[in-house]
């Protein structure tokens, strides 16, 4: 219909609104674009509030709401980042008071651990894991429990705050009745299909969507599994290496390269998934534009979310648990033994993975792509052009404004911006128990992101067609879903990934003196070296030992049922599950309480709306009286009273009007 | 202000609207009251829908909404009752296929159990518990898991259905903008206090409320504890009795009398709590009438809820768990041993308690009080009067309508009606895992309740002052809270009170052949009779045994750590907790999905509202054009165009109007 069909048929190449004018040069008169450039799209004003009213005036309500939401999000990140830094510093401060890591580092304990891989690895002393244990205390301490609860409530407060801000903006921007008046136009493709009346496509459409959604998730899982295999093989290869110095850095090397591979794969898959999601949604032929957009967003979000979080979920909950035990290890794809975590647990590796993914995604996807690629394009264009840069500038001055705007990139909507922010929100809330500095990194990124996006919209892209929107739509539902999932994921991280529960149980149940002494010994089980399977015992044992220790709760070799899961295992498992139940329900109760306590509409706004209604009603009654008088005056000779009679207002009409007309 | 202050000062005795007229007698002309009496307030039309429009016209929107809600609730109870009966019949049908109860009933197993009380009780054979075991299978079978999930979803569907019906009624009754126009008047007491400016009372008010709320809950718990003590002492006394026939009926006698005492205490406390709640709320001096009503409802609900459910919660989760073990029983208040449940578990006793409480409350509180007491009052009044009944009737005919209405009872609001229904809703949803027939009983009660309340409002009470209301207010929030609590309570009932999880674990882990054979033996632990404490062993042992069995998962006397909780205990506890987590989260996910799937406003209603807005806008634009024309015609000589110019409508006013004026 109209210009869209002309564009689709290639009659015109593009159609776009014009920017207000130039921003550089002394001859440029003051215009909105220049104002935005100086007051908003500049790194030097990063500490100022955004001029949301001006943004809305220039770009429309949809873009204005995005930047308002981003501003609220960034503001709310400030207290979260401060508390996160405090929690991290607490971990740093107490790293030396931590009895279990002191026991690990104490060489007098002389604990010999079982080999980490078959044949080529040898026994090792526990004190070599001292550094890792101390480092992991930075993230595995009781303050993380408090911080998880704090972040769950933070998420609720953030969304309440945003709801109220959105309501205020709705009032100020005169959008309060907008939702009801917007007509959802049917898409051209949908009408075409209805005209064709092909039942076969109708039935196949949704199934294709479902099958390919699962297909995308399956691909992600397969790739994650591939990365795991890569890690195992590299580790074994490095062990086989005879270069001694390499061995001491083995773990660090493997971890870092694996994390980088993960990151690269995630970024590549992200782009592929965006295309897959669009293809799937087009297949479904949704009815309206709004419905198309919502389904596209939902599919893209699911695929990107699984993509970003699968390696993290694997690290948090699966690694180190499917290992088996000495003498009966679990082998995957032949002779690869399942990975274990470092002795101190998986929490630190989880933290490193999160850190690399978060920083990497933000640096590469956001900044590199958003700054680098346009600059690269500019550079290529400059190289192709045969003019010098001075001649370019002269030519540029003579161009008309529509020619200048044509050079800029097309506006593709703000959904990609929302998508990055939602994935970042997921990283900030979902595994915050293992990475208290996540809000700080998100805050720093967002401060730059706001101005980066601002520059992009003001300088690099064509002016968007102003779209009206009353709220942020499906993104709000995704935020709410994420914060609900965050509660249970954090409960599981604290209960299963961290060492919080075993320490608690030990201190109050198994400890002979009520302190943490003896905890390390309690968490290790005995293994008789003669019970090794043929060919798996170390070929070059460094130490001559009869028993080696391994981290698990199993019966010793001298019990009735050697190497079975011991009573302590089940007792600690029961306490872990009880912790999850208590944590989830307490946090849900507190969230619901905060949600109920804070009203959705700010009091002054609801008061204003109420007052306006009364004024409107008043005005209407006077109008009715006047009309009736005119009618009486024209048609009859009865005396007219200035007031409307009560009978006419028996069925009182209800109004909701704007003052000001 | 006005009539309320005159009534308060005793200038007038009462002020009330009049009923439409008489309902009996051939001379009575057709009126609304008669119509209501014939079509609504009559047991013979119990199968018909209620005439909600007529109820609203006669009594006002608040009463109309109550009966509409009660109608929806009763309708929704029909499928729930049907499924509950099917589940119950399934239990009846499979009672003979149940291997564990067959093993209990099999005398060849020859299991000797430890005594149920000290000294006076003796050992007993397990097969004497055969009847109880078979009966408890009626309620403790896998179908209850399915029924709990069904009822959780039923609660969500019920509330979605009600929301949509309420929205439809709002539209039809012209209430859509009502909430904004209603002004909340300050209460006279509040303004008095503000005038007095007593800071001291302001600070004490809320504290008193909190302290006395906890006080009321404490009183309930103390009374429950007293009933428990009563049961223990009666049981011991009956054991001491030398009458042999009494012993076989001991458990039944004690259970029944205790349940009846519980019931009587609950009913008495209910009345006391209603008065306490009112006194507390008055102390707080809330600001407005609406706020006063909400706080009163909330306090009364909390106190009545704790009152009705404390004995049930005790039965479900605490009884039989604090018993201790043979040789080391837990004693309370001297020499009373904590009670145990019947061998088959507490589920059947829970069911009986629920049954008695539900039926008893409904029969006594609802029917006896609501039918019996008015009839009693009428009888007393007839006795006091010196006229015969024929003279009464003659006199009655000569009375004026206001005199006739004066004899009727005053209208006290519909909150007591809501309160009974909400407590009943709690009983239907909260412990439904143990009592599948609860929806059926609720359904039968409600069918009678509707017509009972109808008769009461039409015949026995004065006509209420019609109050407008847009929704059922705080009752909806209480319903939502109850259905959320119901999910986790049912999860705990299935996991801890029923035998579902131990059977599952046994069948898939400990069973040698994958069937349930040997389950009973697995759940019993051994006790060496020589380990009894002095004075607690049976004085008259019926059987000569060296070991007796008791129901617990403990180590046998010949292990390293005799009588300690065994590994099976912890493993089964872990599985129970895991079940709670999985059940709660799966049901919450399904409920949220159903909630999201069903739109809050029925499509035809939202379409109608949208259409009316467009018509309103159209009309307004024509009016503006006409006004402008008149203005131009009067003031200026410029040509008038019939259409409104676009400039005037730049800031488009937003309307939401009713058609029909």
Image: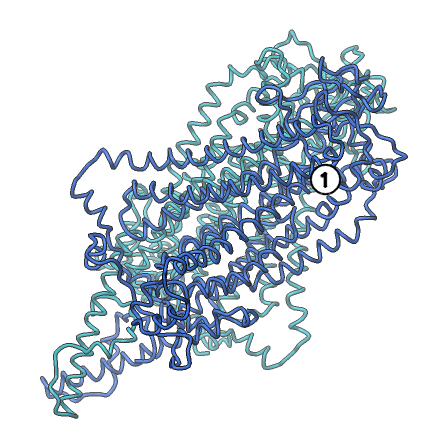
Chain colours: A blue, B cyan
Observer-nearest residue: B633 or B193? B633
Q: Residue A30: percent from the left, percent from the top?
A: 40, 81
Relative to the observer, which residue lies in front, B203 or B348?
B203
The residue at the far left in this view is A635
Mark 1 neighbour class, 10 Å CA radius: few under 14, some 14 to 19, many 20 or more: some
Look at 27% across and 34% down and name the residue there: A203
Q: Is residue A426 left or right of residue A473?
A: right
Quadrant in the picture for the C terminus of chain B: bottom left
The structure residue drawn at horizontal position 19% and vertical position 36%, both measured from the top left corner, is: A198
Taking the image as shown, residue A601 lies to the left or right of residue A199, namely right
Front-lying residue, B644 or B438: B644
Tell me: residue A94, above or below residue B525.
Answer: below
Asked if residue A111 shows in the view, the reply is yes
Q: Position of residue A428 (x, y in %)?
A: 58, 52
Compared with B12, B94 (above or below) is above
Q: What percent of the width, then of the height, locates residue A650?
A: 26, 72
Spot the residue most to the right. A108
Residue plotted at (33% across, 57% down):
B393
Q: Secondary structure at mark 1?
A: loop
Q: Give left or right: position of A155 versus B16.
A: right
Image x and y of residue A523, in percent: 77, 32
In-front residue for pair A67/A400 = A400
Q: Find disc 1 in the rendering and name its residue.
A: A499
């Amino acid at each position: 219909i109209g210009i869209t069909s002309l564009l689709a048929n290639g009659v015109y190449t593009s159609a776009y609104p014009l920017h207000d004018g130039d921003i550089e040069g002394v001859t440029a008169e003051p215009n909105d674009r220049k104002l935005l450039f100086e007051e908003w799209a500049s790194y030097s004003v990063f500490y100022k509030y955004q001029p949301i009213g001006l943004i809305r005036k220039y770009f429309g309500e949809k873009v204005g709401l995005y930047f308002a939401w981003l501003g609220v999000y960034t503001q709310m990140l400030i207290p979260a980042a401060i508390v996160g830094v405090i929690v991290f510093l607490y971990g740093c401060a107490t790293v030396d008071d931590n009895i279990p890591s002191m026991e690990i580092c104490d060489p007098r304990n002389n604990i010999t651990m079982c080999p980490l891989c078959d044949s080529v690895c040898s026994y090792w002393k526990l004190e070599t894991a001292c550094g890792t244990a101390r480092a992991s205390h930075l993230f595995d301490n009781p303050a993380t429990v408090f911080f998880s609860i704090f972040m769950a409530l933070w998420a609720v407060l953030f969304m309440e705050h945003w709801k109220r801000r959105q309501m205020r903006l709705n009032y100020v921007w005169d959008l309060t009745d907008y939702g009801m008046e917007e007509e959802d136009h049917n898409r051209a493709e949908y009408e075409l299909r209805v005209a064709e009346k092909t039942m076969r496509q109708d039935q196949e459409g949704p199934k294709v969507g479902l099958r390919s959604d699962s297909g995308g998730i399956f691909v992600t899982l397969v790739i994650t599994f591939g990365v795991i295999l890569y890690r195992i093989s590299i580790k074994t290869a490095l062990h086989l290496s005879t270069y001694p110095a390499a061995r001491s850095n083995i773990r660090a090397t493997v971890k870092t390269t694996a994390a980088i591979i993960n990151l690269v794969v995630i970024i590549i898959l992200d782009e592929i998934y965006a295309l897959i999601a669009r293809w799937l949604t087009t297949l479904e032929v949704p009815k309206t534009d709004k419905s198309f957009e919502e389904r596209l967003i939902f599919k893209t979000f699911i695929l990107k979310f699984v993509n970003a979080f699968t390696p993290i979920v694997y690290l948090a909950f699966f690694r180190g648990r499917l290992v088996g035990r000495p003498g009966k290890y679990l082998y995957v794809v032949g002779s690869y033994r399942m990975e274990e975590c470092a002795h101190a647990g998986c929490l630190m590796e989880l933290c490193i993975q999160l850190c690399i993914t978060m920083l990497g995604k933000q640096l590469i996807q956001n900044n590199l792509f958003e700054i680098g690629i346009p600059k690269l394009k500019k550079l290529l264009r400059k190289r192709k052009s045969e003019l010098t840069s001075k001649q370019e500038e002269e030519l540029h001055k003579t161009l008309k404004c529509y020619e200048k705007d044509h050079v800029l990139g097309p506006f593709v909507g703000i959904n990609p911006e929302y998508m990055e922010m939602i994935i970042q929100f997921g990283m900030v809330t979902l595994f915050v128990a293992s990475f208290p500095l996540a809000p700080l990194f998100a805050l720093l990124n967002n401060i730059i992101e706001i101005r980066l996006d601002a520059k992009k919209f003001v300088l690099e892209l064509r002016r968007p067609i102003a779209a009206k929107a009353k709220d942020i739509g499906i993104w709000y539902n995704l935020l709410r879903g994420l914060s609900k999932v965050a509660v249970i994921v954090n409960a599981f991280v604290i209960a299963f990934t961290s060492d919080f529960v075993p320490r608690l149980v030990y201190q109050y149940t198994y400890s002979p003196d009520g302190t943490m002494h003896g905890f390390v010994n309690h968490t290790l089980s005995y293994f008789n070296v003669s019970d090794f399977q043929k060919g798996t015992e170390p070929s070059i044992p460094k130490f001559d030992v009869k028993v080696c220790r391994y981290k698990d709760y199993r019966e010793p070799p001298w019990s009735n049922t050697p190497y079975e899961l011991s009573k302590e295992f089940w007792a600690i498992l029961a306490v872990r599950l009880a912790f999850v139940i208590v944590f989830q329900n307490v946090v849900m109760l507190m969230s619901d309480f905060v949600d109920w306590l804070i009203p959705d509409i700010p009091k002054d706004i609801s008061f204003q709306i109420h007052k306006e209604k009364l004024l409107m009603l008043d005005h209407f009654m006077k109008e009715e009286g006047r009309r009736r008088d005119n009618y009486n005056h024209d048609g009859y000779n009865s005396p007219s009273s200035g007031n409307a009679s009560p009978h006419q207002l028996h069925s009182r009409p209800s109004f909701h009007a704007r003052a000001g007309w």
